[in-house]
Structures are given as C-alpha cells and as structure tokens.
Amino acid sequence: MRNLRLLVRQIRYENRAFWRNPAAAFFTFAFPLIFMFVFQAIFGDQIEGNGLTAAAFFTPAIVAFSIVNACFTSLAMTTVAVREEGILKRVRGTPLPAWVYLSARICHSVLVGLLLVVVVSAFGALVYNVAFPWDQVPVLILVLLLGSACFCALGLAISGLVPNERAAPAIVNAIILPLLFISDIFVRIPPDNLLAKVGDIFPVRHFAVALQGIWTPALDGPLDPMDLVWIAGWAVLGLVLALRLFRWEPRV
Amino acid sequence: MSAIVVEQLRKSYGELEAIKGIDLTVNEGEIFALLGPNGAGKTTTVEILEGYRERTSGTVSVFGFDPALRPEQMRARIGIVLQSAGVETYLTVAEVVDLYRGYYPKPRDRDEVLRLVGLDDRPTVRVGKLSGGQRRRLDVAVGICGNPDLLFLDEPTTGFDPGARRHAWATIRGLRDEGKTILLTTHFMDEAQALADRIAIMRAGTVVALGTIDEIQAGRDSSSRIRFEVSAEKTPPAHLVPTDARHGEHGYELWSNKPVDLLHRLTGWALEADVELANLSVSRPSLEDTYLELTGEAAEQTASE
C-alpha cells in the first residue's frame, strides 16, 4: 500500500518534470502529427486503388509510431541520461524500492504514449475523416498496453547497451529507424514483400499491422491474434534482456 | 555501539587488488574521516559500505546489516552524498527535497533541511539554475533530508568558498551533536582536522594509520621542526646546523627531539655573532606532513622537485 502510494507520487513528480521542459514536451506531441501531415501530403488521397485514403493507413501507423516513440525511443534515451547524470545511483541509495522508481518511469512513458494515441486518433478523425474504431475499444486498449509493455522492456534493455548520453541518439535511432521503414509505419509494404518478412521478425510491424486490423480491416484484414502472440514474445524477451543489461551507475 | 564494523575487507577487480584486507570501526555519534590519495581505495571502501559494490571477502556491517544485501531498513537509516550525482533539473529546490523526503519513514522537516545547508533563501529556484556550490549544498540536503543516523559524505565541500566551507562544517558538527554518525572522505587536511573525531589514512588498499589525529601524530616522529633564515655570509657553524639542513635560498630547516636545547645553543650563537634569525619558528609536524609521509607522497614530491 505504501509502495503504491510512493509509485503514484513518483509518477506525479516525473510528470511535473516532463512538462517543465516545454520544448521537449511540445515536440513529443508535435512529432507524430507532423509525420501524419507530411505523409498525407506526399502520398495523397489514394493508396492501392481500393478506395482507402493514405490517412486511413497512416492514422493507425502513426498511432503505433507514437507508442514506439514514447516507450522505446524516449524511454531508452532518458534512461541513459538519468543514469549518466547519476540520478539512478542516487535513487538506489535511498529506501525507495528500485521497482517503484522504474515502474514510475515506465508508467509515465506509457501515459505519454496513450495521450499521443488520443491526439493522433482525434487528428485522423477530425482532419482526415478516418473513423475511430469505437466498437473495438477494449481490444484496442489491450493491444496498446501489450505494445507499450513490449517497447518499454526493449527500451530499458537497449539503455544498458548505450555507453553514454551522447551515443544514445545515434544508437537508438540506428536500431529503430530502419525498423520503422520496414514495419508499415512510414511506408506501406505489402505482406508478401521480402522486406515485410524481415520486418515480421521484429515486434514493430506486428504492432502496426495489429492496429491496422483494428482501424482499417479493409487493408489487410482484421486483427490477427498471432500478431499479439509475437509482440508478447518480444515483451518477454525484452524483459529478460532488460534484467540482464540494465545498469544503475554511470559508465565513467 | 559501532555504526560500522569492517573486518578483513578485500576487493579485487580481476588481477588488481583494490582493498587488501582492512579493518575499521566507526562508532555511533562520531565524525570519522577517511583520507588518502586518489586510488588508495577510499571510494571503493565507502561504496561497499553504501551497498553499491560487492566485496570479494571479509565481513562488513552497517548497523548490523550486511550492506551487500541492500536491506531497505538499512537504506532508511543512511544518507549518501556522492561525489557527483545529478538531480532532476526541472524541479525546484523545495520539490527535490520533498521528493526525496518522501522515500524515508521519518524525514526531517523540509525548511529545517534547507536552513541547515543554507538554501533556505532559494526554495523555488529550479535545480538547473543553481550555481555549482548551491548544487553541492542541495546534494547535502538530499543526503540529510531522510534524517539518517549515518551520513556518508564524499568530499562534501569541494568547490565551496571559505565561508560556505565554514557553514558546511558547522552543519556537519551540528549533526554529530544530534548523535548522528558521519563518515567523511576528504582531500583537505584542514577539513579532517576541523571535523574528525578519528581518522584513517589509506594507501594502496591498506589502512596505514587509524585513530584520533593526536594519537596518529604521537605515534609518529615526535620531533619538532625549527625553521629560520639568515643572510648568505652568516652561515651557522656545522656543529649546530648540518649543511644538508638548507631549506630554500637563505633558509634552514632542522628537526630535533630536544628543541629547547637546540634553540638555546642556536640563539646563543646568533647573539654572539650578531646574526638575525629571520622568520624563526618552532612547530610540530602538521597533519599534512604526517599524511604525506604515511602515504609516500612526500618522497614523490621531493623526487619530482
């Protein structure tokens, strides 16, 4: 009970610090919207001549991107930063249980991700007329939480491999950007394409395809539970890797 | 009662033996200073006590707990001020202190903490806007905000101006007067001299001296140092002052177990020969002299001169 109270308190402090950096907070939210806007402008109204607009593809794709960005990219980079600044080491010397501190950081990332999902969905619905899947909200929440868990675990695992703060953007982007391109996020890749098959090894494409199944089943059919199994598998792997690789102290 | 007991502590990093079997006891309610050059093993020792490092062998106890297990009850009773550790840049001074106070079962009042470290005039300033010295005070504030029974201070006054140092010393003494135990590492001999009830001097992974400063000084060479200067043409006779006692251009430095006797003869010669003994001084070796001798730094310094 005391730990739960500490967790809520820790999340509130994380949140306060997050919004105190308005530039970072603004671009966290503007980033996915800029992508949506640019992609819609580039790819126009039609894809594959099946009557679907590009926005019908990009809305769920950018929803997936939002979660990946908040849970994997941002969490990995900020974790390296707080580790190298010595904040993790300092916290570890207090009676606060380590899991409470880490859970607070994870919860905050997930909350930011979910807030982004709301913003992107609303943007898609209001600006590009992409209907929000109101009939599938429970499944949608399940998929989003599963994806968040998977990418948070992988983000924490990767943070352990990054030697210092300056190397973080280079390493994290080198991992995630190619994946985003072959995972139906920035460009649509038909399922039988070789790149799609490579992308299918990793969790990002399964996550994007699962969200497309919820938003736009006309594209590649409805949600396939196998995608969720695959994401769950990566979540477990991510957790195992995070437990092995996570480090509390600065490298230097 | 002992706050810390260390017996035959060893720590190896691969082939390198950083701590070579040391014994230490820190009593409750005392300020204990750990001195030694960089690489002597101070930080490794302290980090083992804080629960950051695991030891290779030996026994260690902090309030009866094994720090390697990092029990929550132990962490609730200690405060740690690391040499360099960040805090959340976007929170204010008061928010940071409150955040960390919340981790402890019986924290100290926030305003009292800020007053103790001298930040009571800046509670609403963001951490990112603090000066280096103010950041260091905030480190101390975070270290003491849980009202710990044992406080680890790793070079707490580095970067302080003389006034801020005096203030920090007063704060540390005040904590001791409340019955708290303080383990301090420092490079400053005057800091150890001003604060420490007992000290340990480390060198190359071993403790080379342990006790009160007086005890350590008494156990060493008890001779006094006599220094004076004379003008070039008036050299003192060799039976009084050996020629290797030259110290600087016109100066001499002598060590004697019977300073009164030597001074009597020296001043007698000076009166007779009508020589002025400029800057005449008699002193006991300082802690710094003892430290340099014990850590072998004195020899290196002379060799490099």
Image (tube, coloured by chain):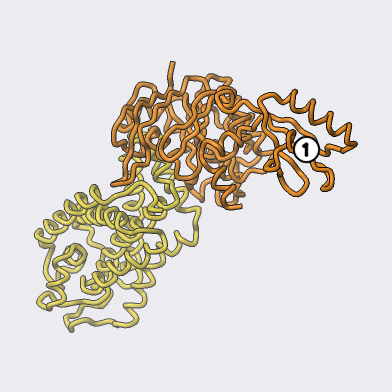
The residue indicated by pointer 1 is B237
Give the colour of chain A: yellow
Q: Nearer the viewer, residue A111 or B96?
A: B96
Give the colour of chain B: orange
Q: Nearer the viewer, residue A148 or A241?
A: A241
Q: Nearer the viewer, residue B108 or B162?
A: B162
- Residue at x 84% of width, y 28% of height: B268
> Based on the displayed image, in which of its 4 quarters is residue A194 positioned?
bottom left
Query: Is residue A76 visible to us here?
Result: yes
> Based on the displayed image, in which of its 4 quarters is residue A38 positioned?
bottom left
Instruction: Report the number of numbered marks.
Output: 1
- Residue at x 29% of width, y 46% of height: B15
Residue B174 is left or right of residue B102, and the answer is right
Q: Is residue B25 above or below residue B136?
A: above
Q: Residue B70 location in percent, x, y?
A: 33, 32
Q: Residue B198 location in percent, x, y?
A: 53, 25
Residue A209 is left or right of residue B192, and the answer is left
Q: Residue B100 location in percent, x, y?
A: 46, 36
Is the residue marked by circle 1 packed among few (<14), some (14-19), or many (20+) residues within 10 Å? few
- Residue at x 10% of width, y 62% of height: A224
Residue type at tag 1: Pro
Residue A87 is left or right of residue A232, and the answer is right
Q: Residue B56 location in percent, x, y?
A: 29, 36
Chain containing mark 1: B
Q: Which of the image's four quarters has the N terminus of chain B? A: top left
- Residue at x 54% of width, y 43% of height: B297
Q: Nearer the viewer, residue A212 or A28?
A: A28
